[in-house]
């Protein structure tokens, strides 16, 4: 899946839950940590992971083209 699709879908679900299920997102899981905070941390991790994968894949596509240009 595309970087934008994965992260856009995750953001949309998080936003929908934050707006429509505020009580659920405010449920405490451990100490002062809520489901909303955990969801935000997971979303941030997913963003960084997909960005790293996208960057690695983009480099693999560019490197062969750069090698052809070297004389």
Image (tube, rainbow, N blue to C red):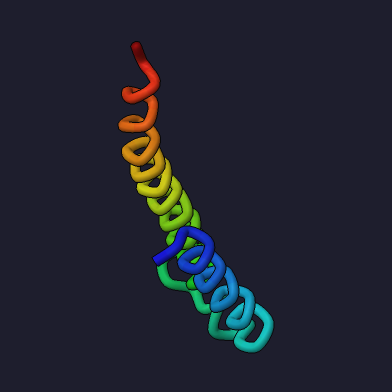
- Relative to 29, is 52 above or below? above
Residue farthest to the top, as pictured: 71
> Residue 12 sits in which quadrant?
bottom right
Give the number of callouts: 0
Residue farthest to the bottom, as pictured: 20
Residue at coordinates 32% horizontally, 38% vertically from top-left?
60
Residue 22 in the figure: left or right of residue 64: right
Residue 52 in the figure: left or right of residue 26: left
- Relative to 66, is 13 above or below? below
Quadrant of the snapshot with the N terminus: bottom left
Of residues 45 and 70, the one nearer the viewer is: 70
Residue 23 x/y as whole percent? 60, 85
Residue at coordinates 54% horizontally, 78% vertically from top-left?
13
Of residues 6 and 39, the one nearer the viewer is: 6
Residue 59 in the figure: left or right of residue 10: left
> Residue 70 sits in which quadrant?
top left
Of residues 28 and 17, the one nearer the viewer is: 17
Residue at coordinates 47% horizontally, 54% vertically from top-left?
47
Q: Does the image show residue 26?
A: no
Residue 15 in the figure: left or right of residue 2: right
Q: Does the image show residue 4?
A: yes
Quadrant of the snapshot with the C terminus: top left
Residue 2 x/y as whole percent? 45, 63
Residue 50 x/y as whole percent? 41, 53
Residue farthest to the front, as pictured: 71
């Amino acid at each position: 899946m595309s970087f934008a699709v994965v992260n856009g879908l995750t953001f949309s679900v998080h936003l929908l839950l934050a707006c429509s299920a505020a009580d659920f997102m405010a449920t405490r899981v451990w100490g002062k940590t809520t489901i909303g905070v955990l969801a935000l941390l997971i979303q941030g991790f997913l963003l960084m992971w997909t960005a790293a994968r996208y960057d690695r894949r983009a480099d693999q596509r560019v490197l062969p083209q750069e090698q052809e240009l070297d004389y």
